[in-house]
Amino acid sequence: MTSPTLDILGIGNAIVDVLAPSDEAFLTARGLPKGGMQLIDTTQAEALYAAMPTGVESSGGSAANTCAVAAALGARVGFLGKVAADQLGEVFAHDIRASGVHFPTPPLASGAPTARCLILVTPDGQRTMNTFLGACVTFGEKDVDAAEVARAKVVYLEGYLFDPPEAQAAFYAAARAAHAAGRKVALTLSDPFCVGRHREAFRAFVANEADILFANEAEILALYETSDFETAAAMAAKDVEIAALTRSEHGSVILSGGARHLVAAQPTKVVDTTGAGDAYAAGFLAAWTRDLSLPEAGRWGSIAAAEVISHYGARPQADLKELVA
Amino acid sequence: MTSPTLDILGIGNAIVDVLAPSDEAFLTARGLPKGGMQLIDTTQAEALYAAMPTGVESSGGSAANTCAVAAALGARVGFLGKVAADQLGEVFAHDIRASGVHFPTPPLASGAPTARCLILVTPDGQRTMNTFLGACVTFGEKDVDAAEVARAKVVYLEGYLFDPPEAQAAFYAAARAAHAAGRKVALTLSDPFCVGRHREAFRAFVANEADILFANEAEILALYETSDFETAAAMAAKDVEIAALTRSEHGSVILSGGARHLVAAQPTKVVDTTGAGDAYAAGFLAAWTRDLSLPEAGRWGSIAAAEVISHYGARPQADLKELVA
């Protein structure tokens, strides 16, 4: 087994975010699920965009955000995901590379445009996401370079990738390549609605392939179809080596090998919760891959999440290395 | 003479900004003129973008920013400017229309892409702008719809439009249409380097066509080739009906019909000076077109400018109507 030359390889949807302020009435009038993510088609995307206020564009995508944050914390990071050969694809590729992340996936030469997520941020800081997957739906097993997976200590998969039809095969290919090389497989559940859409597939992957599981309370309850957090946490602890379960302002619970670690949230002013879970996973994995303890990994996760929710947008603005030091 | 159905019609470059943080060393190493605007070609734009950190995209353009801010203050506003039929062009068109601005110019069907401005913001809040004009270079006399000009109380022209070769004819066409309809012509000098590139053209236009002139200290000194502000101010007062001269934290001086009004700056924390002058002109014209006094117009300008420099980006985030009330 060769020594890993990356700490983390993320695999996920390559998306450009369009953030705009919104009031509750705008969401209600359009039946948008507040705080969640829904998939929209071209027609819906055009209609919603036309109705939205002036936006700000920035690179997003759940696992891609995690990769950018982890790189900012000093981890060696790669990312696999599909943009189109268009202007927004250039923006995504520029930004993730400028974050110091290795990004080898070639753009889709023709067909669907680069994915975008229309994010409405309400005055309480909650974000409601509406995702047009575009070129992401073509991401499949062929895009999982086994050599890239084998290079990294852990491959990190976002649950949102269960939505594009080709991507589940990609997940299994990545997990096989990782385990064949003696590496770990981490998964984030991403969103309770996404878990609801693909529960059986998630359950099988968590039980059979995942070594590390990230989820918030709503997601873990959705996965195990229970309303009791302790029941869900116990089931997760049986399925994976490490379960890191986040509970917003109540911090996180890390379960591993029969042990249970409680980690406090970092107090901060909430401006925009976009990317909170992504940043937690980034902090956790950046610490874990440098062999820090699980409570310390949780602390890095909390600090990264607090930084990201204190401003508009999902990528860090402050010096994260300084914050965790 | 029919009654105007717009307060302000802006004419300018239609640009998408890419903002990124920068240190002084990055500017020095590349010979970028700090605080100013330089034009860059495709090759330079690609090289600079590749070297820049992760950016945030938002609609920009000097006169377009002014239009968005004026609309936020309740003015009835239109804008003429050229985007391409591409993703960034869609972003620009969406944002200006979402601001409530009438934007009738059709996109350029093929050829150059939508213009972008790579803006590096140093820790002192100064912005250094690098503009790739793209589709803007095709904006010309044919794009000036005389009926649109005649609809507005004042046509507002950005000096940056002296750079694209076709645009000077467009300026004169707009001025003729405005004066023929009994309307006023306002001009902002935009940038001392731009004034230096086209001084004779600016001098002629200011003396013969402009009724209202906006400039900061560096720009007015560059126009009249003097190092003395009072000399330049006196020359401006002879050339135009109203000269509104901004002096950063020292506020502004408004000269009109022999009178001189001093307006204080609004105290604020400077995060990013991008759009300060644009916002001042917007506040001024929004107040002036509703027949408020010149000192009150200056106060609106100062308030709008203070809001825009207190955060990243050139478009307003706070409720400007509330701030001026």
Image (cartoon, coloured by chain):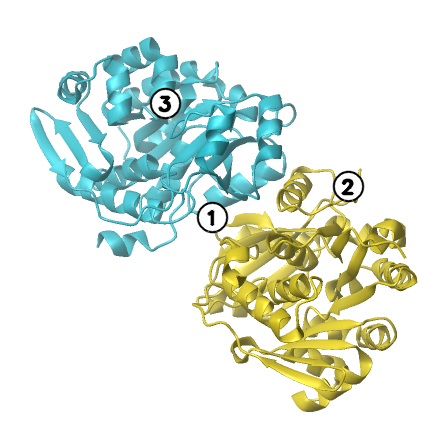
Chain colours: A cyan, B yellow
State the image coordinates of residue B309 (x, y, percent, origin top left). 51, 64
Q: Considering depth in this image, is B38 or A46 the residue closer to the camera? A: A46
- Which quadrant would the N terminus of chain B be assigned to in this image? bottom right
At a point 34% along the width and 17% down the height, the residue shown is A195
Residue A179 shows in this picture:
yes
Q: Is residue A75 above or below residue B272?
A: above
* Three-letter amino acid code at the position of disc 1: Ala
Foreground mark, 1 or 2? 2
Q: Chain of mark 3?
A: A
Disc 3 on helix, strand or loop? helix
At a point 57% along the width and 44% down the height, the residue shown is A54
Which residue is the site of mark 3? Answer: A159
Q: CA distance from mark 1 to mark 3?
A: 25 Å
Residue A5 shows in this picture:
no
Which residue is the site of mark 2? Answer: B107
Q: CA distance from mark 1 to mark 2?
A: 31 Å
At a point 34% along the width and 36% down the height, the residue shown is A278
Q: Considering depth in this image, is B261 or B292 the residue closer to the camera? A: B292
